[in-house]
Image: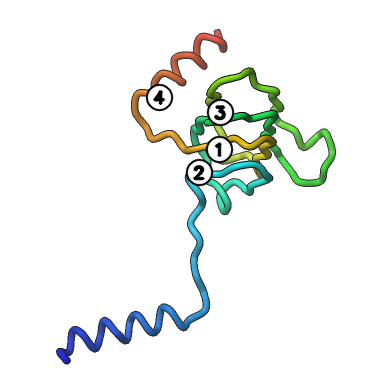
Amino acid sequence: MSRAGKILIAVFIATTTSGTAIAQPARSFGPGTFLVGSDIEPGLYRSEGEIRSFKRLSGLSGESSDIIAIELPPEGPVLIEIKATDVAFYSRGPGVWTKVNTGVEAITWARIKSRFQQ
């Protein structure tokens, strides 16, 4: 076996036996409560399927003061911006949220958002 092959095997063994795996935040998720920064990344998300309600949260105490925003969305896809300052995001319903890549959807969302803020 070549020296490069032995090094590759040694690196593989070291990384698989260290016992520490670094989890990456999900780019897509379903119902539940997710911590921003560790479970999910901040950013723009689009729903697919039925979303019954969702909340952006500033804390996890269960108090109403933790709610930054709450929505009971209409039928159809929803776009939501989860901010880096949010502590968590809660979603109820069988639908799935997927992070939107920068591009047409993000630009469209920025335009729609700016119209409502005027």
Q: Residue furthest left?
A: 2
**Counting residues from the N terminus, which is met first, the one under dot 3 or under dot 4?**
3
Q: Earlier in the sequence, mark 3 or mark 2?
A: 2
Left or right: 76 in relation to 59:
left
Position of 79 with respect to 6 (left or right) is: right
* Residue at image point 71% right, 27% down: 70
Tell me the residue that label 3 is attached to. 80
| Distance between the alpha carbons at the discs numbered 4 and 2 | 16 Å
- Callout 3: 10 Å neighbours few (<14), some, many (20+)? some
The percent position of residue 1, horizontal first and vertical second, equals 17, 92
Q: Secondary structure at mark 3?
A: strand
Extreme bottom residue here? 1
Q: Earlier in the sequence, mark 4 or mark 2?
A: 2
Q: Which residue is mark 4?
A: 105
Q: Which residue is mark 2?
A: 28
Could you tell me which secondary element the residue under label 2 belongs to? strand
What amino acid does circle 4 point to?
Answer: Glu
The answer to the question of whether label 2 and label 1 lie on touching residues, with beta carbons closer than 8 A, is yes
Question: Which amino acid type is marked by label 1?
Answer: Val
Q: Earlier in the sequence, mark 4 or mark 1?
A: 1
Looking at the rendered image, the quarter that the C terminus falls into is top right
Q: CA distance from mark 3 to mark 1?
A: 12 Å
Q: Is label 3 in contact with label 1 (beta carbons under 8 Å)? A: no
Q: Secondary structure at mark 4?
A: helix
